[in-house]
Image (spheres, rainbow, N blue to C red):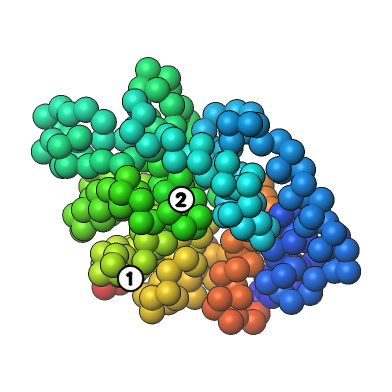
């Protein structure tokens, strides 16, 4: 059955006053009369929850995401509260517990120790377990090193969005991440697919200097996509969120190929599943808009997750 995901997604977000709904209606060009006031109320609430040191209640992840939320809602990086949040995030660099801290033989061989990588953010002390951790996209990282890597990539994205790309510690993080990504040639190596996607998303914001490595990793991601538009071992929406940040023909093509998978997941209320419902609906809506698609035919369940022929 052919479906038009945009119709369902538009109906799903109608009347909501959440960040995702406001962004969805803006993307659709269908802002409601009360949306500007709703956005201001939401910014006021998010700002009020920020403590004097720039953090919000909870672990590091909610504070990192708060910077993204505020900037998504149009609050500038120069705003005192945004600056305070980002300042707290920057303070996580160089703290104990960062990915690549220390050295042992296996990590040294993979060039993933302190001799080769620096600048990563520490979401918590090394002795404090953070996994499993769920990113706002709904992707769950269950392995401890992967969780720390993914949170650091999310923090790097916040710092880059806030205009701190010239800071030496941020440049070290970008350079280390680019060095790691330059060795990603397989989908089932030391880094799991979802970690590859997390790193790709951060590098996508690092500017033209990283265009070559971003293009290489996008090519790897595209090669792994199934005929049904999904990725083996990788979360669909986590992957789409990264690809939507990249202006590259291979990324655009991969997003278009993912549209049947989006249509196959759409429920009667327009949502795209039960996990991270609004965030995934927003990612799906952006993907459909980016592809300029109309009605979509979901893939045949018997073939949709088979590897693409090369």
Which residue shows up at 63% across the image and 31% down it?
Answer: 52
Q: Quadrant of residue 26?
A: bottom right
Which residue shows up at 21% across the image and 58% down it?
Answer: 182
Q: Quadrant of residue 264?
A: bottom right
Q: Which residue lies most toward the right here?
A: 33
49 versus 125 height, above or below: below
If the image is split into quadrants, where does the C terminus sit?
bottom left
Q: Nearer the viewer, residue 5 or 66?
A: 66
Q: Nearer the viewer, residue 193 or 243?
A: 243
Residue 268, visible in the rendered structure: no
If the image is split into quadrants, where does the N terminus sit?
bottom right
Q: Secondary structure at mark 2?
A: helix
Residue 144 position within the rendered picture, expressed as x and y whole percent measured from the top left: 37, 30
Which residue shows up at 46% across the image and 58% down it?
Answer: 163
Instruction: Give the residue number, with chain letter if any, for mark 1.
Output: 208
Instruction: Give the residue number, with chain letter if any, for mark 2.
Output: 159
Residue 60 position within the rendered picture, expressed as x and y whole percent measured from the top left: 52, 33
The residues tagged by marks 2 and 1 sit, at their Cα atoms, a distance apart of 17 Å
Q: Secondary structure at mark 1?
A: helix
Residue 247 position within the rendered picture, expressed as x and y whole percent measured from the top left: 42, 74
Which residue shows up at 31% across the image and 42% down it?
Answer: 119
59 versus 70 height, above or below: above
Residue 249, visible in the rendered structure: yes
252 versus 51 height, above or below: below
């Amino acid at each position: 059955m052919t479906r038009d995901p945009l119709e369902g997604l538009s109906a799903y977000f109608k009347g909501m006053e959440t960040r995702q709904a406001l962004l969805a209606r803006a993307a659709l060009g269908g802002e409601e009369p009360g949306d500007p006031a709703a956005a201001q109320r939401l910014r006021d609430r998010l700002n009020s929850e920020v403590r004097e040191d720039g953090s919000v209640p909870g672990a590091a992840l909610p504070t990192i995401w708060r910077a993204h939320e505020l900037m998504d809602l149009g609050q500038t990086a120069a705003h005192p509260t945004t600056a305070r949040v980002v300042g707290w995030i920057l303070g996580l660099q160089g703290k104990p517990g960062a990915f690549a801290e220390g050295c042992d033989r296996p990590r040294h061989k993979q060039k993933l120790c302190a001799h080769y990588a620096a600048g990563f953010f520490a979401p918590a002390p090394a002795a404090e377990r953070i996994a499993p951790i769920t990113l706002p996209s709904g992707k769950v990282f269950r392995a401890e090193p992967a969780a720390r890597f993914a949170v650091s990539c999310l923090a790097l994205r916040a710092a880059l969005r806030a205009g701190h790309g010239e800071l030496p510690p941020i440049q070290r993080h970008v350079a280390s991440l680019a060095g790691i990504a330059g060795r990603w040639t397989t989908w089932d190596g030391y880094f799991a697919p979802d970690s590859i996607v997390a790193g790709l998303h951060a590098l996508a914001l690092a500017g033209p200097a990283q265009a070559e490595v971003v293009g290489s990793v996008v090519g790897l991601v595209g090669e792994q996509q199934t005929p049904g538009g999904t990725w083996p071992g990788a979360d669909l929406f986590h992957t789409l969120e990264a690809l939507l940040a990249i202006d590259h023909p291979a990324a655009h093509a991969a997003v278009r190929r993912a549209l049947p998978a989006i249509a196959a997941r759409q429920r009667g209320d327009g949502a795209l599943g039960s996990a991270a419902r609004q965030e995934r609906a927003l990612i799906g809506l952006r993907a459909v808009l980016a592809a300029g698609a109309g009605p979509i035919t979901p893939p045949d369940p018997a073939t949709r997750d088979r590897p693409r022929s090369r």
